[in-house]
Image (cartoon, grey):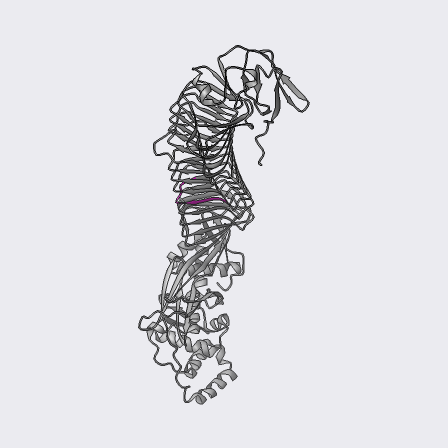
Amino acid sequence: MPQTAAGTSPADWIVDNPTACTVTPHGTSTTFSGIGAGVCIATTTYGSFSNRTGNLTILARPTVYVDDDGACGGNAPCFTTFTGALANATDGYYVVVYAGNYSEHVVVDKQVRIRGLDRYHIVVDGGGNGTVFLVTAGSVEISNLTVREGKYGIFVDRTNDTRIVYNIIENYSYGLYFNRTKDAFTAWNLVTTGQYGVVTDHVHNDAVRWNVIAYNTVYGAKDYDSQLRNCFNWNQFHHNHIAYYYDPNEPLQPFEFDGNVLWANDIGVLVENGPALRLTNNLFQDNGRALVVVGSDLNVSANTFVRNFVAVDITGAAGNVTANAFRDNGIAVACTDAATAIAANTVTGGSAAVVCTSFRGSLEGNDLLPDGGVAIHLDGARDARVTANDAHGRQILLTNSALAELAVVRSEVLATDSTFAALDLGDSRLSESWSVTVVTMAADGTPIGGAHVAAYDRDGHLAASAPTDASGRVTFALLQRTRTAASEITFAPYTIRAEAGGATATSFVAADRPMFVTLALTTAVVPGPAFPWVLVFGSLLALGIGGGLLGVEPLKFALLALAAPLFTRIGKDHVLDDYTRGRVYQYLEMNPGDHFNSICRALDLGAGTVTYHLGVLERMGLVQPRTDNIYKRFYPKGVAPPETNGGTLSEVQVRIVHAVRDLPGISQKELARMMGLRASTVSYQMARLSDRRLVRGERQGRHVRYFPGDGPSGNA
């Protein structure tokens, strides 16, 4: 059993004159009862410590006695039933009950105090039906009894100042039911083994404290539209289906559920459509779902959650979850469509700290150290703020989200189809991926299922591959880039190639947003017969090689072009379906102005192969050549050839280096706009120039600014 709060320890209690008074024998407090005229002294003992009262004088008060064997310890008047005793009592009487078994249904319609002498040996049995005790008078006390086997154990109806204390109530449909009562006090009871343990129905300021409520198949405690304040405190709930359920249908003032211990329940606390319930200083341990909040404004603070399957489960709610301690829960906080502020919590152990769908709130200043690799997983978040959470190197997963702000500490952020209005990576790393859905179909538009689809990054490395489903679809999450506060590595654009039964198709995607690509697969084009008089050019090639002429790229390319195979029946829409030709074109898009020999080396392709594909691309108007002294340079469609520098850098690299020299502190975005290039092209070239120390990046606020590097620059 969980430990109770520090500073409360049970002690032993005795009296020196049991004929005049009694006390409950063991506990953190006692109930003193006068049962006859006389003088008493009460003594409490805890270990070697003891304390005692002074003389307590018990004045004679009208009393009736109940004993099933009619003895009543020699006291009179003595009755064998509660009903008989109450018939002979009036307001203000004591009803003192001796050990026995009483099979009856009792109506308490007078202001009396019913006090048993030993609750373990006084059993009032309802026979499995009806109401064992029905209380209709005010200022009634029922204490120190065992009440069992009724539809209702004790039903208190429209009264004030009722006290139900130190009883055992068991085997019922409803254990304690308070209907429209005021200022009732229910404490130190054991309410166990039934359907509903304690029910408060439209009550006002009743207090339910220090009870043990257990083994209820529906609710341990249930409220119906009651006006409560500081009323459910310091109870223990265990082995209930739902320990406490609060779902008001009326606008009510908030109340506190404080200092309770809840363990081994299917659900600890369930709140639906309620006002600002305050849950503070409770211990939730070993429950299925410790706290479930639906459509409510809640304040959950300073609680401890230990080994629950889900500690806090929020749906459609606002409010705050702050300064709680979560230890070894499956999931600390799960939420759906919530605008909750989750702040300053500590999570240790467990599978994940925060898992939310359609989150609209804030996650701020939490210390997240789960055993699993994922600290935070948000799917479909909108306008949420995720700031200053220390994930201790664990992952923050973001999917299909648009955050108002992301500022992370010691985290690995993996974002798919997600954006950030404000971003501060601090000492963390962000990987940004985008979903690319590929649809494969035949020329007549029929989907092709089972087609093999592969995605290659800008360097030609295989990034993903999978077959299409029956509808011809497959979706990849393609990594666009990884970045830190000081650096960025780009993996896009991607080449998408599909193949089925010898038919192929190729496309290129920027992977900078969610994309949808349709590939129409066609049969591969077979080159025509070899040039019929290639032997003639063989001698020219030999002459060129012998005379060193092939060191001059324009002549070399011209001779190879004459020797290249003819091509036939290549439609403009399918010119890039060939994988190798697609690589050549993609390379030129990323490196406009590179020269022939450099292209061959970069792609590790033979001169004849590159010549053939460049010829096809030129005929189709996708590239244009430019002779630059000894170099033959190529530019993709839409990129105008600049002036050449005659050095080892490509033209686009020279232009970037000159721009950085002329405009130190320029950003990539400004460069791309000024030079008429794609942002991905500028990003790629910046990485290459940084490696050669021709430029250097410097983060200034949210932007990276570029300045001339300290590398050799004679060729630029």
Q: Nearer the viewer, residue 540 or 270?
A: 270
Q: Residue at x 60, y 26 (%)?
A: 10
On the image, the x and y values in percent for residue 539 come to 47, 88
Q: Is residue 96 above or below residue 525?
A: above
Q: Dividing the image into 4 quarters, which one contains the N terminus?
A: top right
Q: Which residues are magenta?
A: 331-340
On the image, the x and y values in percent for residue 124 come to 49, 28
- The stretch drawn in magenta includes residue 338: yes
Q: Is residue 476 above or below residue 337?
A: below
Magenta segment main secondary structure: strand
On the image, the x and y values in percent for residue 312 come to 47, 41
Q: Nearer the viewer, residue 256 or 29?
A: 29
Q: Residue at x 58, y 25 (%)?
A: 28
> In which image quadrant can residue 404 be found?
top left
Q: Nearer the viewer, residue 638 or 112?
A: 112
Q: Residue furthest right?
A: 48
Q: Nearer the viewer, residue 80 or 248?
A: 80
Q: Residue furthest left?
A: 444
